[in-house]
Image (spheres, rainbow, N blue to C red):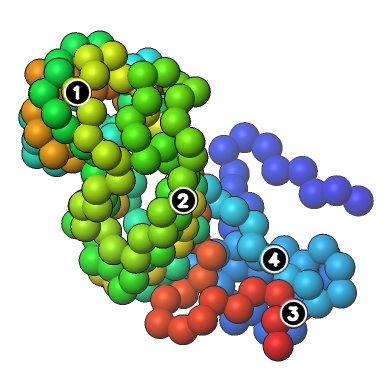
Amino acid sequence: MPVVISGTDNFILNADGLGTAVGGALDYNGTALYFTPTGTQRGVVPGAQFFRLDSNLAGANVNTVQSVFGVGVTLSASTVYEFESVYHFVKTAGTTSHGFGLSFGGTATLNNISYSALFPPTIPVTGNGGTASVFVNTTAANTAYTATTTTAGVSWYAVIRGTVSINAGGTLIPQYTLTAAPGGAYSTVAGSYFLIYPIGASGANVNVGTWA
């Protein structure tokens, strides 16, 4: 017989040791939520924090760090997260030679980070331009991704996926930096998004499921 919860009541799981995985079990260890669909094959239930732009966000005509979305996400201490994102940038003016770099800022301290970015090495003039390349990064510091361009009208994208281990909790802010002020600001295009969710505790391998 189903259990019905109505009104403003919440169904709350107490944080506990995961113990032995059993088919049909829903578990919570204080860091992430897990479900075992069959046998002992426990898996992570993504409790995702998600941000998506609904309109273009104008940046500034500068060569200093800028926020991709204008906001950051607050993450918990001693937790490993998986994340994915799509950035799309456009500008319509400015011919000063410049390139593009990406980074992560904020108040959270990191044990480690690893992510890959799919992007065109030359900044294209249309959203479909450029041959895709993959860059793998293991630092949150600013990293140059593109060759320089002097084109006024630019449309540039990056598809990113990775994991990050948080030491002290705080904010994580997706950022970009131009190598020079191009003469016209970029905007982050509507539909760009960032998704992040916890997968386990930091300080050891994250082992969820039947890995042995």
* Amino acid type for the residue under numbered disc 1: Thr
If you read the primary sequence from the N terminus, does the residue marked by circle 3 or circle 4 appear first? 4
User: What residue appears at the point 24 percent right and 48 percent down from the top-left corner?
Assistant: 144
Crowd band around label 2 with a 10 angstrom C-alpha radius: few (<14), some (14–19), many (20+):
some
Question: Residue 116, how many percent across, how many down?
Answer: 45, 55
Q: Which residue is mark 3?
A: 210
User: What residue appears at the point 31 percent right and 20 percent down from the top-left corner?
Assistant: 154
If you read the primary sequence from the N terminus, does the residue marked by circle 1 or circle 3 appear first? 1
User: What residue appears at the point 37 percent right and 25 percent down from the top-left corner?
Assistant: 124
Is residue 135 found left or right of 199 in the rendered image? Answer: left
Seen as rendered, the residue at the extreme bottom is 212
* Amino acid type for the residue under numbered disc 2: Val
Badge 4 marks a residue whose secondary structure is strand
Q: Which residue is mark 2?
A: 134
Residue 16 versus residue 137 in the image, above or below: below
Q: Which residue is mark 1?
A: 150
Is residue 136 found left or right of 34 in the rendered image? Answer: left
Nearer the camera: disc 3 or disc 2? 2
Q: Which residue is mark 4?
A: 43
Badge 1 marks a residue whose secondary structure is loop
Nearer the camera: disc 1 or disc 3? 1
Whether residue 80 is visible here, answered yes or no, is yes
Q: Quadrant of the C terminus?
A: bottom right
In terms of image quadrants, where is residue 146? top left
